[in-house]
Amino acid sequence: MSEMIATSGVRPRQLTPEEIAEIEHEMTLYPDKKAVGLEALKIVQKHQGWVSDESLLAISRYLDIPAADLEGVATFFNLVYRQPVGKKVILFCRSVSCWIMGCESVRAAIREKLGIDYGETTADDEYTLIPVPCLGDCDNAPVMMVDEDLHRRLTPEKIDAIVAAYKDANDQGKGA
Amino acid sequence: MAKIIVDGVEYEVDSDNNLLQECLSHGLDLPYFCWHPCMGSVGACRQCAVKQYKDADDEKGMLVMSCMTPATDGAIISIKDQQAVQMRERVIESLMTNHPHDCPVCEEGGECHLQDMTLMSGHNYRRYDKKKRTHRNQYLGPFISHEMNRCIACYRCVRYYDDYAGGTDLAAMASHNHVYFGRHQEGTLESEFSGNLVEVCPTGVFTDKVFSQRYSRKWDLQAAPSVCTGCAVGCNTTPGERYGELRRVVNRYNSEVNGYFLCDRGRFGFGYVNSAERLKVPVRQGDGQQEELDANEAHQLVQRLDGKIIGIGSPRASNESNFALRNLVGDDNFYAGVSAKQHAANQLILELHRDAAFHVPSVREIESCDAVLVLGEDVTNVAPRIALALRQSVRNKAKELAESANIPQWQDAAVRELAQEDRSPLAIFSNYASRLDDVASDTVVAGNQKLVKLGSAIAAELAGESASAGLDEAERELIGRVAQQLSSARRPLIVAGSSARSMELIKVGANIARALGKRSGNVIDFALLLPEVNSLGLSLLVQKDKDLSAALGVMESGAAKHCIVLENDLYRRAATSEVDAAIAGVDSLIVIDQLATPTSAKADIVLPATAFSEHEATYVNYEGRAQLSYQVHRNHSAARPAWRWLCENPAQQVEELVDRCAESVSAFKGIASLLPDLNSMIAGMRVPRQSHRYSGRTAMKAHVNVHEPKQAVDSDSVMSFSMEGIPASKDATVLGASWAPGWNSNQSISKFQDEINGKLKQEHCGELLLKDKQASGDFFNVTADQSDANNGLEVLPAYQIFGSDELSAHAPAIRERMTDAYLSLSPQDAEQLGLKHGQGAGIAGTDYVAIVCIREKIQPGTVAVYCGTEINPHDLPERIVLNANADIAERGIRGLIVSDLLEESY
Ligand code: SF4
Ligand code: SF4
Ligand code: FES
Ligand code: FES
């Protein structure tokens, strides 16, 4: 791959041994390195929470994929985070069924409770709210996912309880 | 031939094509965006919908994308069908929802494919009144402006830039209604062919930044068919002028040479024409004094020189100027203004041109070759447009695979998906890694000796001789592989030339091609690259032994009283001390040039010459193709075409000179056919350089004189400096800017083509001068020169697309992309010499200092030297010793793109 000197000050970071091991494993599953781009982005995100410019360049270098192409992949999927996100990501469905079932009032409750709207992160870096199309659970609309947990048949009132539960779990985790 | 019916009319078609292409070939108006004649179809924009019927009884039909539907025999379609019309209108309406409608401030306006298609589709009023998505634009370097809001997401830019031109730093980002076409981060677009984005993007996202700085609408530009003078490829261009300034250069379609694309040197390298440093008046100078001369007096002075005069011609001057100089001084006193080595290489190349065993292929033909060996050439930096063609040649494998899988060639995505990384072989043997290496099947980076050795082994292998002497296992395998690829190819191609400054390498190329020809009985494609626009033309006018060394010798000896130097800087052609001594030996030195040079600084008389866009002239490209370049605009200073200073008649017309050249130099016999006859023009009317819509003509000089001045008369050509006359409407004999009813953008070119991607109607593609072949010669006896390997590093010449060409290096935009003179070293040598990347190093025995560039793939013991504008390459010995230079610690190398920089070192 060609290199042009000094187009930007950003330099690739060093991938961690864990990241490299996982990427290497993926490489055994695909016919060529280029195909591993998306998996590598997911691996780095898993370890770092998000994909920084430095991480993107590191993967680009490691897999010999042009940074522009990799950026194309990273930005195509809105669950690859190219900005830092909170510790928990709320994937909030705003598709048809959830909309009919009143997701807008739930969104308002989140805004009220956490002070964040779509694309925003709480000041304490605890939550990021991201809108998504249909989560595939329409019969339980409105729904949202917090990390891996699906929360169904949401009402504005349920938000308080959900946030409180996460806070408890978090505190306990710290305590233990 | 297959037939299709379009709206009740029967057309003969090539069933290997798609419906869109065939409709356009037949001159029908059918809107499209994502399809491109060179890039095929992907069906992304849905703009080209037509109705297709199963048979004559089918009344309902169904909508299909014409670009994705083959033109099968018997197909019945309708463009005019109401549903199809409506579909196309709605598609464009939806594409336009986010478009800012900023035509008045958009550089694309007036030559915008999106404007044309919008009108053609009948979407005249917008209904969408919601918010539009907006984007942030990027800085993309000195050539290209970015205005992403105008994007209609047709994907043409990335398909051109990445898929076609091999760029890696432009991509489609994000998804749905906010896709973004740009770089990963702001920064200069790295591709040497980025300028084509301006013409590929159907709207104003990528526009010409140089043009923007001094902008005019297309219809306000005075334009004429011209030829790029940036290198020996001779791409066809249409420069545009306004208010006495050259404003831009765009591609001019030539089916055999450049097709639809130019390189960035050609597109952005014209700026020197407008430079304040242009020579404007004839002067007599000496002893620090300068005296302006009256132009007629100066002309007379040249004509009445007494005593022996010698003339030094130039590969960057036209045939006419060189011929006029030759006539003035006499055949025996006319010398090539190129170094002895270059002249010898040119003569050898001429000899090979005439050898019946070889054919020097056009750019178009190069694209169709299916196995290529490049010997010692940095094609991207020496003959850029050919590098783009070689990039297409490796796709012949994909085309073959598609054919055997029954996939039509125009199904671009399918063909690429099928082939993946499968490519036709391209072996590159070069002095340093090249920008084509990413698609090469084999690369060897080494000094000339080794390249000669390996090349000779290939020739021997092909000739059925033992090739293994002195080769290691890996080398034997490589030789066997390349020989096998070349001999089993349908159309193999050898690329060689004068860049590596090795006659042996050219001879090795000839031996390989000859051996291939002997095996197959075919004439073998042998592309011989030369450095400058008229290198070949000059060589045809000069006697074999009249190189620059000979001229300098005559001058130094005092045997010549006067020397006339035509558009040439001798300090780029021979060692400084030799030139100094030669100049000291003549009574008077007369220099004719466009810009001041170190040579003109030493002249007694300096005469200003017009630039390529200011005169009509012919040039001979690397194939021996003579091409005519028309005058675009006038020069308002005392500058004259060089031949007018040199011919007795100060009003000498170029056409008569061309005729005389054709009569008196046998090689130029065919050149007169380049001149169109005024009588063959419609009603004997001249072809206007200005469009019918050219505005402000009567007011242009209003600040000087309120009366409209008489339009200047062009006595030289069939074109006029006015709007009057008959512009090309279908016939392309004299086609500068192309327009057709409803088609204001460059895509109107399809209206002038016989068929899409084919010849222009009545096009003159130029005249091949070296068609007469002599019997095949013999194999060359090649011995690699043995130089003393113990002392210093072997110098290998390095080239840069932006900087190696003398004139374009004066263009402001090109300057922004130029790099320092640099010394490419292997990491081993750098370490041994204690040199770091980006640090200065002095060249022992000279005053020159250059920047160290550590490259992964340089053969230890060699140094690739890029001389830039700082170093006279002829001052360097064949081997050099380097010393660290403390003054330049680590400044890096600005804007350099190489394919194998060492990662740690920058
Ligand atoms: S930038 Fe131009 S070429 Fe690229 S997708 Fe947008 S409109 Fe098409
Ligand atoms: S390849 Fe050569 S002739 Fe063609 S545009 Fe570039 S510089 Fe001009
Ligand atoms: S619409 Fe929300 S889960 Fe399907
Ligand atoms: S041109 Fe046919 S879909 Fe774009």
Image (spheres, coloured by chain):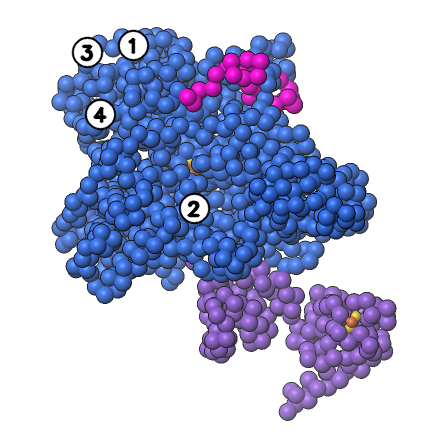
Chain colours: A purple, B blue
Nearest to the observer: residue B341 or residue B717 = B717
Relative to B899, is B722 on the left or the right? right
* Left or right: residue B657 compared with residue A17: left
Task: Please tell me whether the stretch drawn in magenta is mainly helix, strand or loop.
Answer: loop
Which label belongs to residue B303? 1
Label 4 in the same subunit as label 2: yes
> Do the residues at discs 2 and 1 belong to one chain?
yes
Q: Circles 1 and 3: CB distance less than 8 Å?
A: no
Residue depicted at 23% across the width and 43% down the height: B507
Pointer 4 residue: B543
**Secondary structure found at label 4:** loop
Q: What stretch is highlighted in magenta?
A: B673-697
Residue B554 screen position, x and y as percent: 16, 23
- Separation of disc 3 and disc 2 at Cα? 54 Å
> How far across and down, in percent of the image, does residue B240 sit?
54, 28
Quadrant assignment for the C terminus of chain B? bottom left
* Above or below B705: residue A20: below
Question: Quadrant location of residue B870?
Answer: top left
Whether marks 3 and 2 lie on the same chain:
yes
Query: Between B436 and B870, which is closer to the camera in this rendering?
Result: B436
In the structure shown, which secondary structural element does the residue marked by tag 3 occupy? loop
What amino acid type is highlighted by mark number 4? Gln
